Image (cartoon, helix red, strand yellow):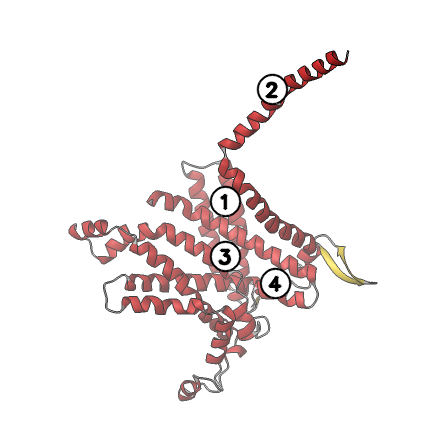
Amino acid sequence: MKNSSLTMRSEASVRSVPLVLAWRRPLAARLDQHPGAVFILPAVLVILAFSIFPLLASLYVSLTRLSFAEGGVELKFVGLDNYLKLLVGIDRTHFLGVTPGLTVASAIVLAVIYAGLGFLLVRYIRGPGRTAVGLVGRLLVAFVAGAFAWLLVSTLLTTGRPGTLVVTIIYVTVDVAVQYVLALGLALLVVQRLPGRRFFRVVFLLPMMITPVGVAYLFRMLTDTSKGPLYPLWNHFGLSDVSWVTNPWGARLAVMIGDIWQWTPFIFIVLLAALESVPEELLEAGVVDGANRWQLFKSITFPAILPATTTVVLIRIIEAFKIVDLPNVLTNGGPGTATESLTLHAYTIWRALDIGGSAAVAYMLVFVVTFVGISYVNLFRRRVAAMA
């Protein structure tokens, strides 16, 4: 009996081995087909954990309010109160600014902007490639862009005062535009066969090697008209009693000049690499065909560097929204809140232990950057694909 039972168990185990192998073989075969994904997946999961968890945690914090309790502190869930406080509550003037009634000139400017948005929508509706999803997306973009336009016009072209959102948009728009123009001009100059061009390639990169805090302290000394290295120059022109930080636009200009000086080399080095990769044969063919310098740049050079241009500008837009060192060290956000960016706004109220409000400002910044980034990509994606 014992022998027969052992025989039955062995036969059953032998029959089960092929079943186990049959179950394991497809899984192993699938893993063998995607070895790259198998090796990369653990690292991706770790990166997602460190990226998504802080986002979710800060999102929860933005819906709470810090309060002191026995034995420590606690976060009380308040829903959307922190966001409503920024949009329609007590922090509205700090976040959005003071928006008085429109003047005749500001109303005309706003009407022109709305007419342009309407023209773009009508052109898309009448175009051949329209889709329902594309129409809904463009309506949403037009609505948000119209709201931004009203906020900018009502705070900048009237007697109003811009808030931290408008100040940040000013920084991003002016800084990135000027940085790109200067970087493109320097890159076009350096690719020419001029003596000493290698030396200037290194010199143009020096501002990027300095920390943002160092740049802020440098420009704080340069803009000090009462003392500092440029005091003889200010005194010669009768500006020794003039202070940059007492005038809102003077203080903003000082911050923007410092940011432009620091980050122009980043765009410069990317555009220089793109310009040096343009085939010489195309340029020589254009010269043979009788094209002048402007025609060569417009028809050959610029389309060739457009992919690099769109990428580097997108990176700088995202980074410019996070400006904090220069306004903090150079002007401390002043005068008042004239130079305070969104990131500095979040840091300021965080120091006042308004943790939920600080997280709400940070998430508003995330929403604005996401909207601007997606709109920018959709705007230039088809043009880049058409020129490629």
Q: Which residue is mark 2?
A: 18
Q: Horizontal and vertical percent for residue 374?
A: 50, 48
User: Label 3 amino acid?
Assistant: Ile
210 relative to 191 in the view: left or right: right
User: Nearer the viewer's eye, disc 4 or disc 2?
Assistant: 2
Give me the disc on residue 318. 3
User: Label 4 amino acid?
Assistant: Phe
Q: Which residue is mark 1?
A: 138
Q: Nearer the viewer, residue 8 or 142?
A: 8
Q: Nearer the viewer, residue 165 or 120?
A: 165
Q: Which residue is mark 4?
A: 95
Q: Residues within 10 Å of mark 3 (few under 14, many from 20)?
A: some
**Image quadrant in which the N terminus is located:** top right
Placement of 264 over or under 308, stated as above or below = below
Q: Secondary structure at mark 4?
A: helix
Proximity of marks 4 and 2: CB atoms separated by less than 8 Å: no
Q: Horizontal and vertical percent for residue 83?
A: 66, 56
For the residues marked 4 and 1, what is the alpha-carbon distance in whole angstroms? 26 Å
User: Label 2 amino acid?
Assistant: Pro
Proximity of marks 4 and 1: CB atoms separated by less than 8 Å: no
Sequence order check, earlier mark of 4 and 1: 4
User: Nearer the viewer's eye, disc 4 or disc 1?
Assistant: 4
For the residues marked 4 and 2, what is the alpha-carbon distance in whole angstroms? 68 Å
Q: Secondary structure at mark 2?
A: helix
User: Nearer the viewer's eye, disc 1 or disc 2?
Assistant: 2
For the residues marked 2 and 3, what is the alpha-carbon distance in whole angstroms? 57 Å
Q: For residue 121, say whether it is visible.
A: yes
For the residues marked 1 and 2, what is the alpha-carbon distance in whole angstroms? 58 Å
Q: Horizontal and vertical percent for residue 174?
A: 45, 64
Q: Dividing the picture into quarters, in which one does residue 341 lie?
A: bottom right
Sequence order check, earlier mark of 3 and 1: 1
